Amino acid sequence: MKKEVDALISKGGLLYYSMIDDAQGLPEKLEKQLKDKKIKLPNFKTEYDTWYSEAHAVIKQVLPDRLVDFVKQYKDEKRKEIDFLTYGIADYLLGLRTTRYGGSEVIADGSAAVGKMQIQNSILEAAAKRFESSLFDIQEVLQADMFDSELGAARELAKKGFVRGGGAIAGVVLEKHLGHVCEMHGHKSRKKHPSISDYYQLLKENDIIDTPKWRFIQHLGDLRNLCDHNKDREPTKDDVIELVEGVEKVIKTVF
């Protein structure tokens, strides 16, 4: 979806250049850049409607408070006269040109719509930034749901006697969460496949967690290792329940 929105913005930029080319001609430098990149400008009058419909849908969904502004650049339904400020893209598509004094003075023509196209694409770009934020929010919600579900499964396995399986699942959730927190803070381990200990050490070194929290997570890591590897003793149901509850606490307090 993000790729489609980005493609829509790129198309809007080319439509904008197409309007400039039609209204006043492209600057020589820009024309050369497009030619060097072998970019062919779209036919504005045949391709704008499709772009408008798709962009309208995106803005309506993601940035509804700017939808009126977006539509107004196309056509101002409340205008009382057509001048340079009220001339819209709909007028450009019709080839409308208004004059006075018997046609000797042009009030508005296609050049008045060029800035309107630029504004529309700018609104779409703003929607794209909001869209990225929305995607992040969706990701956080889905991840939280997934973790809750996995920890619930781990607790049930432990209660039914499958302690190693339950501990392994809880350990995976802990590792995923710590890795996600490191990523959100822009910290990356040098190891190709970092472990829980690598993540909590990275978080402590960068002052994201304090020493008590670091020790608490270290203890959870030890419980996870007890479940995953052959140790001096077998993990118990209480060990896994403690691990699950500890991971739930970390998810809610370490971010």
Image (cartoon, grey):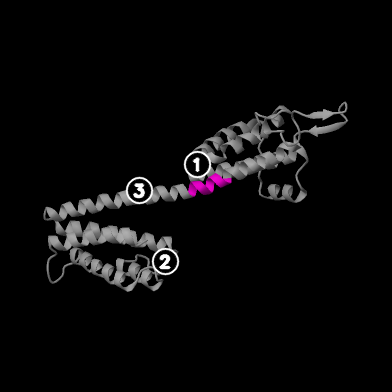
Q: Residue at x 52, y 37 (%)?
A: 60
Q: Residue at x 39, y 50 (%)?
A: 139
Q: Label 3 to label 2, Cα distance in Å? A: 23 Å
Which is the main secondary structure of the residues drawn in magenta? helix
Of circles 1 and 2, which is in front? 1
Can the viewer see residue 254? yes
Left or right: residue 156 versus residue 35 is left
Tag of residue 129: none
Residue 69 in the image: state x and y as whole percent.
61, 38
Left or right: residue 90 versus residue 190 is right
Residue 244 in the image: state x and y as whole percent.
22, 59
Residue position for label 3: 142
Residue neighbourhood size for the residue with mark 2, other residues' Cα within 10 Å, grouped as few (<14), some (14–19), many (≥20): some
Residue 53 in the image: state x and y as whole percent.
56, 33
**For residue 165, which quarter of the picture?**
bottom left
Residue neighbourhood size for the residue with mark 3, other residues' Cα within 10 Å, grouped as few (<14), some (14–19), many (≥20): few
Residue position for label 2: 188
Left or right: residue 248 versus residue 2 is left
Q: Is residue 114 magenta?
A: no
Q: Can you say whether 96 is above or below 145 in the image?
A: above
| Viewer-closest of 147 and 83 | 83
Residue position for label 1: 62
**For residue 50, which quarter of the picture?**
top right
The span picked out in magenta is 125-132
Q: Residue at x 31, y 49 (%)?
A: 145
